[in-house]
């Protein structure tokens, strides 16, 4: 693995901890403030909505100015958002607290395109052969964060100062990450690969259809963007109701939810480090992506029915296998299809599309859960099946645009023989 990838993996891990601290906490905060689960879903949607606006602009700026300055700016936005979130603890009245929390998510969302810039950075410093492995390690680092973050959130919020404890911890982690990035991160984009001009007109940046039409390999990328949209809608709806499902179906309290998510994090680590390489070696990136999309709806159906933790856990393992196979390979396939000079723009569009549907997901998930409860999982599974069919039908178009080193090597050998 390229040593230049380590700062980004560290960034992903620490931000993952900060982002998952509130998973077992926020639903209980909203209920304690006297609001419904539908409001919880709307609050979750705030971050991806504003990420939708910020991501393409940050991606374009990173193609022009370089990756490092944009990553530093976005990380500073994350730090500011946690300071604002902590201020909600001192608000008088439930409405004031809710609005301050929402505003903190706005700030984090606007600068939340750092994942697109981080992915572009990784594409800059890795070869095609390294990329799936690196994105797999990136997924494993997020799995570690998912394992550690919720437990830390539960424990730091269980004290006398409540969720202010989680906010203080996240602020400290964000500060350390910002300093570490400033000291450790080197610029990955060479001068010759920087774009000479930059269009920051927000109306142009948000006209994603126009931006997509001007991309190289547009047919394959359009199908990958569509796959991203469907999967984010499905998996985002699942993560929206996850903690509520734990509380209502399995009867878990806030601390027990933290331990449950700890177990889920262990599953993700196993899947990312053991099963992902196995599938990738046997079926390649695209085949692994299709397999992950096939497994996900099966897992959603399976977790609908258990009312015991011990029966639920094996079902959760299957669902997490689907996610572990899908997320890194989708990212890897997209970076391999994208043109090098458009990497930041492609990642910005991808993050923006993902954010838009991640914003729809909690609204849809919260609305459905408030009305049909656990059957929301069945609805999401049906959407997942439709997404699998679309991806399977698109496989040849995507494969045609992927680099095939073995074919190039065979052609090179043949040309040498003829010569």
Image (spheres, grey):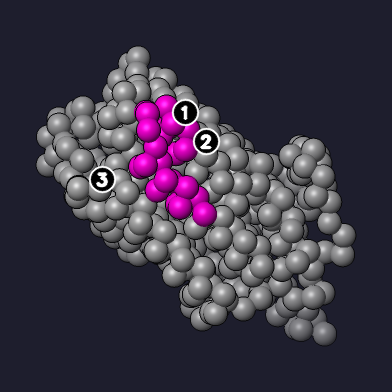
Relative to the observer, which residue lies in front, 1 or 177?
A: 177
Q: Is residue 179 visible?
A: yes
The quarter of the displayed image where residue 145 is located: bottom left
Dot 2, crowdedness within 10 Å: few (<14), some or many (≥20)?
A: many
Q: Residue furthest top?
A: 371
User: On the image, numbered disc 1 is attached to which residue?
Assistant: 42
Left or right position of 88 against 47: left
Rendered position, 176 above or below 258: below
Mark 3 to mark 1: distance in Å? 23 Å
Give the class, few, some or many, for how many residues have Cα within 10 Å of label 1's Cα (few <14, many ≥20).
Answer: many
Q: Is residue 177 above or below residue 305?
A: below
Residue 271 appears left or right of 342: left
Pick whichever of labels 3 and 1 is earlier in the sequence.
1
- Judged from the image, the secondary structure of the residue bearing numbered disc 1 is helix
- Residue at left 21%, top 32%? 247
Q: In front: mark 2 or mark 3? A: 3
Location of residue 174 (image quadrant) = bottom left
The magenta-colored residue range is 80-102
Q: Position of residue 139 (x, y in %)?
A: 42, 59
Residue beneath disc 3: 162
The residue identified by callout 2 is: 46
Q: Position of residue 323 (x, y in %)?
A: 40, 47
**Label for residue 237?**
none
Dots 2, 1 in contact, CB < 8 A? yes
Q: Residue at x 69, y 48 (%)?
A: 56
* CA gap, disc 2 and disc 1: 7 Å
């Amino acid at each position: 693995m390229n040593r230049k990838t380590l700062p980004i993996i560290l960034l992903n891990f620490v931000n993952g901890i900060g982002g998952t601290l509130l998973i077992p906490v926020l639903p209980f905060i909203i209920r304690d403030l006297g609001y419904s689960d539908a409001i919880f879903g709307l609050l979750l949607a705030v971050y991806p909505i504003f990420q939708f606006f910020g991501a393409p602009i940050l991606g374009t700026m990173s193609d022009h100015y370089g990756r490092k300055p944009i990553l530093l700016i976005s990380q500073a936005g994350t730090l500011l958002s946690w300071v604002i979130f902590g201020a909600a603890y001192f608000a008088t009245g439930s409405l004031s607290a809710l609005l301050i929390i929402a505003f903190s998510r706005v700030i984090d969302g606007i600068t939340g395109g750092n994942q697109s810039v981080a992915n572009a950075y990784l594409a800059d410093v890795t070869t095609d052969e390294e990329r799936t492995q690196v994105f797999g390690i990136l997924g494993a680092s997020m799995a570690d964060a998912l394992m550690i973050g919720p437990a830390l959130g539960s424990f730091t919020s269980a004290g006398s100062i409540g969720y202010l404890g989680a906010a203080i911890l996240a602020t400290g982690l964000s500060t350390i990450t910002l300093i570490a990035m400033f000291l450790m991160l080197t610029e990955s984009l060479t001068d010759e690969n920087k774009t000479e001009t930059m269009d920051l007109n927000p109306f142009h940046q948000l006209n994603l259809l126009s931006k997509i039409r001007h991309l190289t390999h547009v047919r394959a990328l359009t199908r990958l963007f569509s796959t991203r949209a469907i999967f984010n809608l499905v998996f985002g709806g699942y993560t929206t109701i996850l903690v509520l499902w734990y509380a209502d179906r399995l009867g878990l309290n806030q601390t027990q939810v933290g331990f449950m998510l700890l177990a889920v994090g262990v599953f993700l680590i196993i899947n990312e480090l053991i099963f992902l390489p196995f599938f990738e070696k046997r079926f390649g990136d695209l085949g692994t992506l299709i397999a992950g999309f096939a497994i996900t709806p099966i897992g959603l159906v399976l977790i609908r029915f258990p009312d015991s933790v011990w029966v639920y856990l094996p079902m959760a393992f299957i669902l997490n296998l689907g996610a572990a196979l899908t997320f890194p390979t989708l990212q890897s396939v997209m970076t391999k299809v994208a043109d090098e000079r458009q990497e930041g723009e492609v990642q910005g569009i991808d993050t923006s599309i993902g954010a838009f549907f991640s914003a729809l997901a909690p609204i849809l998930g919260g609305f459905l859960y408030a009305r049909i409860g656990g059957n929301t999982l069945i609805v999401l599974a049906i959407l997942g099946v439709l997404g699998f069919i679309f991806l399977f039908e698109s496989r040849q178009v995507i494969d045609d645009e992927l680099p095939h080193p073995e074919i190039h090597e065979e052609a090179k050998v043949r040309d040498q023989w003829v010569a």
